[in-house]
Amino acid sequence: MSNSTFNSPEFNKRLARRHAAERRFKLIGLGAIVISLAFLALLLFIMMRNGLGGLNWDFLSGSDSTDPHVAGIWGAAKGSILTMLVTLLLSFPMGVLAAIYLEEFAPRSRWIELVEVSINNLAAVPSIIFGLLGLAVFINTLGMPRSSPLVGGLTLALMTMPVIVISGRNAIKAVPPSIRDAALAVGASKVQAVFHHVLPLALPGILTGTIIGMARALGETAPLLMIGMRAFIVTPPDGITAPSSVLPMQIFLWSDEIDKAFVQNTSAAIIVLLVFLLVMNGLAIYLRNKFEVRW
Amino acid sequence: MNETKLIARNVDVFYGPKKAIDNVSIDIDNGIVTAFIGPSGCGKSTFLRSLNRMNDTIAGARVTGEILLDGENIYAPTMDPVALRARVGMVFQKPNPFPKSIYENIAYGPRIHGLANSKAEMDAVIESSLTKAGLWDEVKDRLTDAGTALSGGQQQRLCIARAIAVSPEVILMDEPCSALDPIATAKIEELIDELKENYAIVIVTHSMQQAARVSQRTAFFHLGNLVEYGETSEIFTNPREEKTKDYITGRYG
Protein backbone atom coordinates (compact mmCIF):
# COMPACT_ATOMS: atom_id res chain seq x y z
CA MET A 1 0.00 0.00 0.00
CA SER A 2 2.54 2.55 1.10
CA ASN A 3 4.95 1.31 -1.55
CA SER A 4 2.53 2.02 -4.32
CA THR A 5 1.84 5.53 -2.92
CA PHE A 6 5.49 6.50 -2.89
CA ASN A 7 6.21 5.05 -6.31
CA SER A 8 3.25 6.46 -8.16
CA PRO A 9 3.92 8.86 -11.09
CA GLU A 10 1.83 11.45 -9.21
CA PHE A 11 4.13 11.34 -6.23
CA ASN A 12 7.28 11.45 -8.33
CA LYS A 13 6.02 14.48 -10.20
CA ARG A 14 5.31 16.31 -6.94
CA LEU A 15 8.72 15.33 -5.64
CA ALA A 16 10.42 16.68 -8.75
CA ARG A 17 8.51 19.96 -8.37
CA ARG A 18 9.59 20.25 -4.74
CA HIS A 19 13.23 19.74 -5.67
CA ALA A 20 12.92 22.28 -8.47
CA ALA A 21 11.52 24.84 -6.02
CA GLU A 22 14.49 24.24 -3.77
CA ARG A 23 16.97 24.78 -6.61
CA ARG A 24 15.14 27.95 -7.67
CA PHE A 25 15.28 29.36 -4.15
CA LYS A 26 19.01 28.73 -3.86
CA LEU A 27 19.60 30.50 -7.17
CA ILE A 28 17.50 33.51 -6.21
CA GLY A 29 19.23 33.78 -2.82
CA LEU A 30 22.62 33.61 -4.43
CA GLY A 31 21.52 36.24 -6.95
CA ALA A 32 20.46 38.60 -4.16
CA ILE A 33 23.86 38.29 -2.52
CA VAL A 34 25.74 38.76 -5.78
CA ILE A 35 23.80 41.91 -6.67
CA SER A 36 24.34 43.59 -3.31
CA LEU A 37 28.02 42.65 -3.21
CA ALA A 38 28.47 43.79 -6.80
CA PHE A 39 27.50 47.33 -5.82
CA LEU A 40 29.95 47.28 -2.94
CA ALA A 41 32.65 46.03 -5.29
CA LEU A 42 31.78 48.72 -7.81
CA LEU A 43 31.95 51.42 -5.11
CA LEU A 44 35.31 50.13 -3.89
CA PHE A 45 36.62 49.90 -7.44
CA ILE A 46 35.64 53.48 -8.36
CA MET A 47 36.96 54.85 -5.08
CA MET A 48 40.25 53.01 -5.48
CA ARG A 49 40.67 54.12 -9.09
CA ASN A 50 39.92 57.75 -8.30
CA GLY A 51 41.37 57.99 -4.85
CA LEU A 52 44.38 55.72 -4.44
CA GLY A 53 46.60 58.14 -6.36
CA GLY A 54 45.80 60.83 -3.83
CA LEU A 55 46.53 58.72 -0.76
CA ASN A 56 49.99 59.78 0.35
CA TRP A 57 51.53 60.98 3.56
CA ASP A 58 50.90 64.67 2.78
CA PHE A 59 47.21 63.93 2.25
CA LEU A 60 46.95 61.83 5.41
CA SER A 61 48.73 64.40 7.58
CA GLY A 62 47.40 67.65 6.10
CA SER A 63 44.28 69.69 6.73
CA ASP A 64 41.74 71.33 4.48
CA SER A 65 42.88 73.95 2.00
CA THR A 66 41.50 75.82 -0.99
CA ASP A 67 44.29 74.22 -3.03
CA PRO A 68 43.30 70.60 -3.76
CA HIS A 69 46.97 69.55 -3.99
CA VAL A 70 47.69 70.83 -0.49
CA ALA A 71 44.41 69.80 1.12
CA GLY A 72 44.63 66.81 3.50
CA ILE A 73 42.40 64.67 5.67
CA TRP A 74 44.05 64.69 9.09
CA GLY A 75 42.11 67.71 10.35
CA ALA A 76 38.77 66.04 9.62
CA ALA A 77 39.99 62.64 10.83
CA LYS A 78 41.12 64.09 14.13
CA GLY A 79 37.78 65.89 14.39
CA SER A 80 36.01 62.56 13.85
CA ILE A 81 38.15 60.81 16.47
CA LEU A 82 37.49 63.51 19.09
CA THR A 83 33.78 63.58 18.28
CA MET A 84 33.53 59.79 18.52
CA LEU A 85 35.34 59.81 21.86
CA VAL A 86 32.85 62.29 23.30
CA THR A 87 29.98 60.24 21.87
CA LEU A 88 31.30 56.97 23.25
CA LEU A 89 32.12 58.31 26.72
CA LEU A 90 28.59 59.67 27.07
CA SER A 91 26.35 57.24 25.26
CA PHE A 92 27.95 53.97 26.41
CA PRO A 93 27.64 54.37 30.18
CA MET A 94 24.30 56.14 29.89
CA GLY A 95 22.90 53.61 27.44
CA VAL A 96 24.08 50.59 29.42
CA LEU A 97 22.81 51.95 32.74
CA ALA A 98 19.45 52.81 31.19
CA ALA A 99 19.23 49.32 29.67
CA ILE A 100 20.07 47.66 33.00
CA TYR A 101 17.55 49.76 34.86
CA LEU A 102 14.75 49.17 32.37
CA GLU A 103 15.39 45.46 32.08
CA GLU A 104 16.25 44.50 35.67
CA PHE A 105 14.96 47.09 38.08
CA ALA A 106 12.11 49.14 36.65
CA PRO A 107 8.72 48.16 38.05
CA ARG A 108 6.23 47.18 35.35
CA SER A 109 4.00 50.22 35.03
CA ARG A 110 2.37 52.51 32.50
CA TRP A 111 5.08 55.07 33.13
CA ILE A 112 7.87 52.65 32.25
CA GLU A 113 6.01 51.49 29.15
CA LEU A 114 5.90 55.11 28.03
CA VAL A 115 9.65 55.41 28.58
CA GLU A 116 10.22 52.25 26.53
CA VAL A 117 8.11 53.47 23.64
CA SER A 118 9.87 56.82 23.73
CA ILE A 119 13.30 55.22 23.54
CA ASN A 120 12.26 53.06 20.60
CA ASN A 121 10.90 56.15 18.88
CA LEU A 122 14.04 58.11 19.65
CA ALA A 123 16.08 55.51 17.76
CA ALA A 124 13.97 56.18 14.67
CA VAL A 125 14.04 59.98 14.75
CA PRO A 126 15.74 61.43 11.62
CA SER A 127 19.22 62.57 12.47
CA ILE A 128 18.75 66.15 11.26
CA ILE A 129 16.23 66.65 14.07
CA PHE A 130 18.94 65.75 16.56
CA GLY A 131 21.12 68.39 14.85
CA LEU A 132 18.45 71.04 15.45
CA LEU A 133 18.10 69.87 19.05
CA GLY A 134 21.87 70.12 19.52
CA LEU A 135 21.88 73.59 18.04
CA ALA A 136 19.04 74.77 20.26
CA VAL A 137 20.17 73.15 23.50
CA PHE A 138 23.94 72.90 23.49
CA ILE A 139 24.86 76.00 21.49
CA ASN A 140 22.04 78.50 21.90
CA THR A 141 20.96 77.65 25.44
CA LEU A 142 24.09 76.27 27.10
CA GLY A 143 26.48 78.43 25.09
CA MET A 144 28.89 75.67 24.09
CA PRO A 145 31.36 76.47 21.28
CA ARG A 146 29.91 76.15 17.79
CA SER A 147 31.53 73.69 15.33
CA SER A 148 33.30 71.84 18.16
CA PRO A 149 33.70 68.05 18.63
CA LEU A 150 32.17 68.58 22.09
CA VAL A 151 28.82 69.68 20.68
CA GLY A 152 29.08 67.23 17.78
CA GLY A 153 29.80 64.39 20.20
CA LEU A 154 26.94 65.38 22.51
CA THR A 155 24.52 65.53 19.60
CA LEU A 156 25.61 62.18 18.21
CA ALA A 157 25.48 60.69 21.74
CA LEU A 158 21.77 61.58 21.90
CA MET A 159 21.37 59.65 18.67
CA THR A 160 23.50 56.68 19.65
CA MET A 161 22.15 56.19 23.15
CA PRO A 162 18.77 54.70 22.13
CA VAL A 163 20.56 52.22 19.87
CA ILE A 164 22.74 51.12 22.81
CA VAL A 165 19.72 50.93 25.12
CA ILE A 166 17.81 48.72 22.71
CA SER A 167 20.68 46.36 21.93
CA GLY A 168 21.68 46.36 25.59
CA ARG A 169 18.20 45.34 26.70
CA ASN A 170 18.12 42.53 24.17
CA ALA A 171 21.52 41.30 25.34
CA ILE A 172 20.44 41.44 28.99
CA LYS A 173 17.16 39.69 28.19
CA ALA A 174 19.12 36.88 26.51
CA VAL A 175 20.95 35.99 29.75
CA PRO A 176 19.10 32.99 31.20
CA PRO A 177 17.06 33.78 34.34
CA SER A 178 18.65 30.75 36.02
CA ILE A 179 21.88 32.75 36.39
CA ARG A 180 20.05 35.46 38.34
CA ASP A 181 18.37 32.78 40.49
CA ALA A 182 21.74 31.19 41.15
CA ALA A 183 23.27 34.45 42.35
CA LEU A 184 20.26 35.50 44.43
CA ALA A 185 20.02 32.07 46.04
CA VAL A 186 23.53 32.33 47.52
CA GLY A 187 22.56 35.70 48.96
CA ALA A 188 23.72 38.15 46.32
CA SER A 189 21.81 41.42 46.25
CA LYS A 190 20.00 42.37 43.06
CA VAL A 191 22.75 44.81 42.09
CA GLN A 192 25.43 42.19 42.74
CA ALA A 193 23.57 39.60 40.68
CA VAL A 194 23.34 42.06 37.80
CA PHE A 195 26.85 43.48 37.89
CA HIS A 196 28.70 40.27 38.80
CA HIS A 197 26.81 37.84 36.58
CA VAL A 198 24.28 39.27 34.14
CA LEU A 199 26.27 42.20 32.80
CA PRO A 200 29.47 40.24 32.00
CA LEU A 201 27.37 37.73 30.06
CA ALA A 202 25.50 40.47 28.23
CA LEU A 203 28.62 42.48 27.45
CA PRO A 204 29.43 40.95 24.03
CA GLY A 205 25.94 41.79 22.79
CA ILE A 206 26.07 45.27 24.29
CA LEU A 207 29.45 45.93 22.66
CA THR A 208 28.19 44.79 19.28
CA GLY A 209 25.24 47.15 19.52
CA THR A 210 27.48 49.97 20.70
CA ILE A 211 29.85 49.62 17.77
CA ILE A 212 26.96 49.49 15.30
CA GLY A 213 25.62 52.70 16.84
CA MET A 214 29.07 54.28 16.78
CA ALA A 215 29.62 53.29 13.16
CA ARG A 216 26.36 54.96 12.27
CA ALA A 217 27.37 58.08 14.21
CA LEU A 218 30.74 58.14 12.44
CA GLY A 219 28.99 58.39 9.08
CA GLU A 220 26.48 61.07 10.14
CA THR A 221 26.63 64.38 8.32
CA ALA A 222 23.21 65.99 8.57
CA PRO A 223 23.06 66.73 12.32
CA LEU A 224 26.59 68.09 12.26
CA LEU A 225 25.67 70.50 9.48
CA MET A 226 23.18 72.05 11.89
CA ILE A 227 25.76 72.70 14.57
CA GLY A 228 28.26 74.29 12.22
CA MET A 229 30.78 71.49 11.77
CA ARG A 230 31.00 72.37 8.08
CA ALA A 231 33.39 75.22 8.77
CA PHE A 232 36.52 75.55 6.68
CA ILE A 233 39.20 74.41 9.11
CA VAL A 234 42.84 74.64 8.07
CA THR A 235 44.42 73.34 11.29
CA PRO A 236 43.51 70.11 13.08
CA PRO A 237 41.45 70.77 16.23
CA ASP A 238 43.64 70.82 19.36
CA GLY A 239 40.85 69.85 21.74
CA ILE A 240 37.17 69.06 21.98
CA THR A 241 36.21 72.73 22.13
CA ALA A 242 38.20 73.83 19.04
CA PRO A 243 36.35 74.34 15.74
CA SER A 244 36.54 71.19 13.71
CA SER A 245 35.18 69.19 10.81
CA VAL A 246 34.60 65.43 10.52
CA LEU A 247 35.30 62.87 7.80
CA PRO A 248 31.85 62.62 6.16
CA MET A 249 31.56 66.40 6.29
CA GLN A 250 34.90 66.77 4.53
CA ILE A 251 33.70 64.36 1.85
CA PHE A 252 30.52 66.40 1.47
CA LEU A 253 32.43 69.69 1.24
CA TRP A 254 34.98 68.43 -1.28
CA SER A 255 32.37 66.77 -3.46
CA ASP A 256 30.80 70.22 -3.78
CA GLU A 257 34.00 71.90 -5.02
CA ILE A 258 34.19 73.06 -8.61
CA ASP A 259 37.88 72.27 -9.05
CA LYS A 260 38.19 68.83 -10.74
CA ALA A 261 41.25 68.02 -8.63
CA PHE A 262 39.00 67.65 -5.58
CA VAL A 263 37.47 64.51 -7.09
CA GLN A 264 40.59 62.59 -6.16
CA ASN A 265 40.52 64.10 -2.64
CA THR A 266 36.89 63.10 -2.21
CA SER A 267 37.58 59.51 -3.21
CA ALA A 268 40.68 59.33 -1.03
CA ALA A 269 38.66 60.68 1.93
CA ILE A 270 36.02 58.02 1.32
CA ILE A 271 38.71 55.35 1.45
CA VAL A 272 39.93 56.74 4.77
CA LEU A 273 36.36 56.74 6.14
CA LEU A 274 35.82 53.16 4.99
CA VAL A 275 39.08 52.08 6.65
CA PHE A 276 37.85 53.73 9.86
CA LEU A 277 34.60 51.78 9.67
CA LEU A 278 36.45 48.56 8.92
CA VAL A 279 38.69 49.05 11.96
CA MET A 280 35.67 49.71 14.18
CA ASN A 281 33.82 46.65 12.94
CA GLY A 282 36.96 44.55 13.35
CA LEU A 283 37.25 45.81 16.90
CA ALA A 284 33.61 44.84 17.51
CA ILE A 285 34.23 41.29 16.35
CA TYR A 286 37.44 41.04 18.39
CA LEU A 287 35.77 42.30 21.57
CA ARG A 288 32.76 40.06 21.08
CA ASN A 289 34.94 36.98 20.73
CA LYS A 290 37.12 37.99 23.64
CA PHE A 291 34.25 38.42 26.10
CA GLU A 292 31.96 35.71 24.79
CA VAL A 293 31.36 32.98 27.36
CA ARG A 294 30.34 29.61 26.04
CA TRP A 295 28.40 27.11 28.07
CA MET B 1 17.77 16.69 67.70
CA ASN B 2 14.61 17.36 65.81
CA GLU B 3 13.78 20.91 66.76
CA THR B 4 11.47 22.84 64.48
CA LYS B 5 13.35 25.09 62.08
CA LEU B 6 10.66 26.61 59.91
CA ILE B 7 7.06 27.27 60.83
CA ALA B 8 4.50 28.37 58.25
CA ARG B 9 1.12 29.62 59.45
CA ASN B 10 -1.85 30.35 57.19
CA VAL B 11 0.33 31.11 54.20
CA ASP B 12 -1.34 32.30 51.00
CA VAL B 13 0.68 33.01 47.86
CA PHE B 14 -0.79 35.05 45.04
CA TYR B 15 0.42 35.61 41.51
CA GLY B 16 -1.47 38.76 40.65
CA PRO B 17 -5.13 37.96 41.32
CA LYS B 18 -4.54 34.19 41.16
CA LYS B 19 -4.19 32.33 44.43
CA ALA B 20 -1.47 29.69 44.01
CA ILE B 21 -1.22 28.61 47.65
CA ASP B 22 -4.20 28.55 49.95
CA ASN B 23 -3.84 28.69 53.71
CA VAL B 24 -0.89 26.36 54.22
CA SER B 25 0.47 25.72 57.70
CA ILE B 26 3.39 23.40 58.21
CA ASP B 27 6.31 22.79 60.59
CA ILE B 28 9.66 21.80 59.12
CA ASP B 29 12.22 20.15 61.38
CA ASN B 30 15.96 20.28 61.57
CA GLY B 31 17.98 17.18 60.81
CA ILE B 32 15.50 15.51 58.50
CA VAL B 33 14.45 15.67 54.88
CA THR B 34 10.97 16.97 54.18
CA ALA B 35 9.51 16.18 50.77
CA PHE B 36 6.80 18.16 48.97
CA ILE B 37 4.90 16.02 46.47
CA GLY B 38 1.86 16.58 44.33
CA PRO B 39 0.73 16.83 40.71
CA SER B 40 2.08 19.51 38.36
CA GLY B 41 0.79 22.97 39.15
CA CYS B 42 -0.21 22.06 42.72
CA GLY B 43 1.91 24.87 44.16
CA LYS B 44 4.66 22.85 45.77
CA SER B 45 7.45 24.78 44.02
CA THR B 46 5.68 28.07 44.67
CA PHE B 47 5.51 27.29 48.36
CA LEU B 48 9.17 26.22 48.38
CA ARG B 49 10.21 29.50 46.78
CA SER B 50 8.32 31.46 49.40
CA LEU B 51 10.50 29.88 52.10
CA ASN B 52 13.55 31.92 51.04
CA ARG B 53 11.64 34.75 49.39
CA MET B 54 12.71 33.82 45.87
CA ASN B 55 9.13 34.73 44.93
CA ASP B 56 10.11 38.34 45.56
CA THR B 57 11.80 38.32 42.15
CA ILE B 58 8.55 37.47 40.38
CA ALA B 59 6.49 40.52 39.49
CA GLY B 60 3.04 40.40 41.04
CA ALA B 61 3.84 37.64 43.53
CA ARG B 62 2.53 38.29 47.03
CA VAL B 63 2.73 36.24 50.23
CA THR B 64 0.44 36.61 53.23
CA GLY B 65 0.47 34.76 56.52
CA GLU B 66 3.56 34.02 58.58
CA ILE B 67 6.71 32.06 57.88
CA LEU B 68 9.03 31.85 60.87
CA LEU B 69 12.68 30.84 60.68
CA ASP B 70 13.85 30.12 64.24
CA GLY B 71 10.85 32.13 65.42
CA GLU B 72 11.63 35.17 63.26
CA ASN B 73 9.10 36.19 60.58
CA ILE B 74 10.95 36.16 57.27
CA TYR B 75 8.40 38.52 55.71
CA ALA B 76 8.77 41.09 58.49
CA PRO B 77 10.00 44.49 57.29
CA THR B 78 13.10 44.04 59.43
CA MET B 79 14.09 40.86 57.59
CA ASP B 80 16.58 41.44 54.79
CA PRO B 81 15.89 38.93 51.98
CA VAL B 82 19.59 38.97 51.05
CA ALA B 83 20.59 37.87 54.56
CA LEU B 84 17.72 35.37 54.60
CA ARG B 85 18.93 33.67 51.41
CA ALA B 86 22.37 33.24 52.93
CA ARG B 87 20.66 31.26 55.70
CA VAL B 88 18.20 29.43 53.46
CA GLY B 89 20.03 28.17 50.38
CA MET B 90 18.46 26.79 47.24
CA VAL B 91 19.22 24.23 44.56
CA PHE B 92 17.22 24.46 41.34
CA GLN B 93 15.61 22.05 38.95
CA LYS B 94 18.10 22.58 36.16
CA PRO B 95 21.74 22.70 37.26
CA ASN B 96 22.70 26.37 36.94
CA PRO B 97 26.41 26.78 37.64
CA PHE B 98 27.85 30.19 36.82
CA PRO B 99 29.78 30.11 33.52
CA LYS B 100 32.99 30.41 35.53
CA SER B 101 35.54 28.02 36.99
CA ILE B 102 34.56 25.37 39.52
CA TYR B 103 36.55 27.30 42.14
CA GLU B 104 34.83 30.60 41.35
CA ASN B 105 31.40 29.00 41.43
CA ILE B 106 31.86 28.10 45.07
CA ALA B 107 33.98 31.09 46.08
CA TYR B 108 31.34 33.60 44.99
CA GLY B 109 28.97 33.24 47.94
CA PRO B 110 31.63 33.25 50.69
CA ARG B 111 33.31 36.21 48.99
CA ILE B 112 30.26 38.48 48.87
CA HIS B 113 29.43 37.62 52.49
CA GLY B 114 33.04 38.06 53.63
CA LEU B 115 33.25 34.52 55.02
CA ALA B 116 36.88 33.91 54.06
CA ASN B 117 39.59 36.41 54.88
CA SER B 118 42.50 34.87 53.02
CA LYS B 119 43.28 32.68 50.05
CA ALA B 120 44.02 29.81 52.43
CA GLU B 121 40.67 30.19 54.18
CA MET B 122 38.88 30.32 50.85
CA ASP B 123 40.72 27.21 49.66
CA ALA B 124 39.57 25.44 52.81
CA VAL B 125 35.95 26.49 52.21
CA ILE B 126 36.16 25.25 48.62
CA GLU B 127 37.57 21.90 49.68
CA SER B 128 35.12 21.29 52.48
CA SER B 129 32.12 22.34 50.37
CA LEU B 130 33.14 20.11 47.49
CA THR B 131 33.89 17.26 49.87
CA LYS B 132 30.47 17.54 51.52
CA ALA B 133 28.89 17.59 48.07
CA GLY B 134 30.80 14.43 47.16
CA LEU B 135 32.56 16.11 44.28
CA TRP B 136 36.05 16.83 45.63
CA ASP B 137 37.76 13.66 44.39
CA GLU B 138 36.35 14.12 40.91
CA VAL B 139 37.36 17.76 40.45
CA LYS B 140 40.26 18.50 42.83
CA ASP B 141 42.78 18.47 39.97
CA ARG B 142 40.78 20.77 37.73
CA LEU B 143 39.31 23.46 39.93
CA THR B 144 40.07 26.07 37.28
CA ASP B 145 38.02 24.26 34.63
CA ALA B 146 34.63 25.71 33.74
CA GLY B 147 31.82 24.53 36.01
CA THR B 148 29.64 24.27 32.94
CA ALA B 149 31.97 21.68 31.40
CA LEU B 150 31.02 19.10 34.05
CA SER B 151 28.38 16.45 33.46
CA GLY B 152 24.79 17.20 34.49
CA GLY B 153 25.01 15.27 37.74
CA GLN B 154 28.35 16.84 38.62
CA GLN B 155 26.94 20.29 37.84
CA GLN B 156 24.08 19.68 40.23
CA ARG B 157 26.48 18.56 42.96
CA LEU B 158 28.52 21.69 42.21
CA CYS B 159 25.36 23.73 42.77
CA ILE B 160 24.81 21.92 46.07
CA ALA B 161 28.43 22.67 47.04
CA ARG B 162 27.84 26.30 46.11
CA ALA B 163 24.80 26.41 48.39
CA ILE B 164 26.69 24.73 51.24
CA ALA B 165 29.64 27.11 50.94
CA VAL B 166 27.77 29.98 52.59
CA SER B 167 26.89 27.71 55.57
CA PRO B 168 23.12 27.88 55.31
CA GLU B 169 20.80 26.41 57.94
CA VAL B 170 18.16 25.23 55.49
CA ILE B 171 18.62 23.90 51.95
CA LEU B 172 15.67 24.03 49.58
CA MET B 173 15.78 21.74 46.57
CA ASP B 174 13.38 22.23 43.69
CA GLU B 175 13.21 18.92 41.81
CA PRO B 176 17.01 18.64 41.88
CA CYS B 177 17.13 15.36 39.97
CA SER B 178 14.54 15.90 37.27
CA ALA B 179 17.20 16.69 34.66
CA LEU B 180 19.51 13.84 35.68
CA ASP B 181 19.98 10.21 34.74
CA PRO B 182 19.30 7.44 37.31
CA ILE B 183 22.96 7.05 38.35
CA ALA B 184 23.46 10.77 38.91
CA THR B 185 20.11 10.81 40.72
CA ALA B 186 21.23 8.02 43.05
CA LYS B 187 24.37 9.99 43.93
CA ILE B 188 22.38 13.13 44.74
CA GLU B 189 19.95 11.14 46.87
CA GLU B 190 22.84 9.61 48.79
CA LEU B 191 24.23 13.09 49.27
CA ILE B 192 20.89 14.45 50.53
CA ASP B 193 20.81 11.63 53.06
CA GLU B 194 24.25 12.61 54.37
CA LEU B 195 23.53 16.34 54.39
CA LYS B 196 20.39 16.04 56.48
CA GLU B 197 22.52 15.58 59.63
CA ASN B 198 23.54 19.21 59.48
CA TYR B 199 20.74 21.02 57.69
CA ALA B 200 17.02 21.14 57.44
CA ILE B 201 16.38 19.95 53.90
CA VAL B 202 13.20 20.51 51.94
CA ILE B 203 12.90 18.79 48.59
CA VAL B 204 10.23 19.19 45.96
CA THR B 205 9.95 16.13 43.81
CA HIS B 206 7.82 14.74 41.06
CA SER B 207 8.89 11.25 41.85
CA MET B 208 7.03 9.54 44.66
CA GLN B 209 9.70 6.85 44.80
CA GLN B 210 12.26 9.56 45.41
CA ALA B 211 10.17 11.08 48.20
CA ALA B 212 9.84 7.64 49.74
CA ARG B 213 13.58 6.98 49.46
CA VAL B 214 15.04 10.24 50.77
CA SER B 215 12.50 11.88 53.06
CA GLN B 216 11.37 11.32 56.61
CA ARG B 217 8.32 13.57 56.29
CA THR B 218 6.13 14.15 53.28
CA ALA B 219 3.68 16.90 52.48
CA PHE B 220 1.13 16.27 49.75
CA PHE B 221 -0.09 19.36 47.88
CA HIS B 222 -3.09 19.52 45.62
CA LEU B 223 -4.49 22.61 43.85
CA GLY B 224 -2.68 24.97 46.21
CA ASN B 225 -3.79 23.18 49.36
CA LEU B 226 -1.73 21.14 51.77
CA VAL B 227 -3.83 17.98 51.78
CA GLU B 228 -1.81 15.82 54.11
CA TYR B 229 1.45 16.08 56.02
CA GLY B 230 3.09 13.39 58.09
CA GLU B 231 5.75 10.73 58.44
CA THR B 232 6.76 9.54 55.00
CA SER B 233 6.19 5.92 55.93
CA GLU B 234 2.66 6.77 57.08
CA ILE B 235 1.81 8.78 53.98
CA PHE B 236 2.89 6.04 51.65
CA THR B 237 1.49 3.05 53.49
CA ASN B 238 -1.48 4.44 55.30
CA PRO B 239 -2.66 7.80 53.99
CA ARG B 240 -5.54 9.40 55.86
CA GLU B 241 -6.97 11.32 52.93
CA GLU B 242 -8.62 9.76 49.92
CA LYS B 243 -6.90 12.26 47.60
CA THR B 244 -3.46 11.31 48.88
CA LYS B 245 -4.22 7.67 48.41
CA ASP B 246 -5.41 8.24 44.85
CA TYR B 247 -2.27 10.20 44.05
CA ILE B 248 0.24 7.77 45.49
CA THR B 249 -1.46 4.81 43.88
CA GLY B 250 -1.18 6.58 40.54
CA ARG B 251 -4.87 7.29 39.94
CA TYR B 252 -3.93 10.77 38.77
CA GLY B 253 -0.72 12.74 38.48
Image (cartoon, coloured by chain):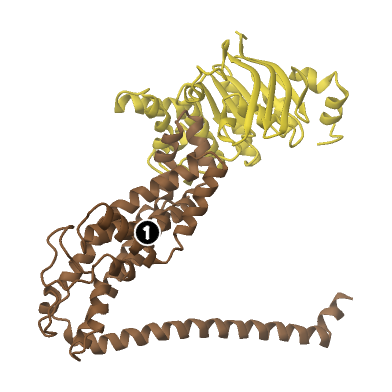
Chain colours: A brown, B yellow
Which quadrant of the figure has residue A193?
Answer: top left
Q: On screen, A291 above or below A272?
A: above
**Image mark count:** 1
Q: On screen, B149 above or below A35?
A: above
The answer, for residue B197, to whether it is visible in the render is yes
Residue at the outermost bottom position: A260
Q: In this view, does B224 lie to the left or right of A41?
A: right
Q: On screen, B224 above or below A9?
A: above
- B78 or B97: nearer the viewer: B78
Could you say where residue A19 lies in the image, as x and y percent from the top left?
Answer: 68, 83
Mark 1 neighbour class, 10 Å CA radius: few under 14, some 14 to 19, many 20 or more: many
The residue depicted at 56 percent of the width and 42 percent of the height is: B152
The answer, for residue A174, to whether it is visible in the render is no
Which quadrant of the figure has residue A261?
Answer: bottom left
On the rendered image, what quadrant is the N terminus of chain A found in? bottom right
Q: Which amino acid does label 1 sit on?
A: Thr
Could you say where residue A264 lies in the image, as x and y percent from the top left?
Answer: 21, 87
Tell me the element at label 1.
helix
Q: In this view, does A179 lie to the left or right of A45?
A: right
Residue that carries the numbered disc 1 in the rendered image: A160
Q: In this view, does A264 lie to the left or right of A94?
A: left
Q: On screen, A154 above or below B203?
A: below
Could you say where residue B161 lies in the image, as x and y percent from the top left?
Answer: 49, 30
Could you say where residue B178 lies in the image, as x and y percent from the top left?
Answer: 65, 39
Which quadrant of the figure has residue B29?
Answer: top right
- A250 or B224: nearer the viewer: A250
Residue at the outermost front position: A140
Chain ID, mark 1: A
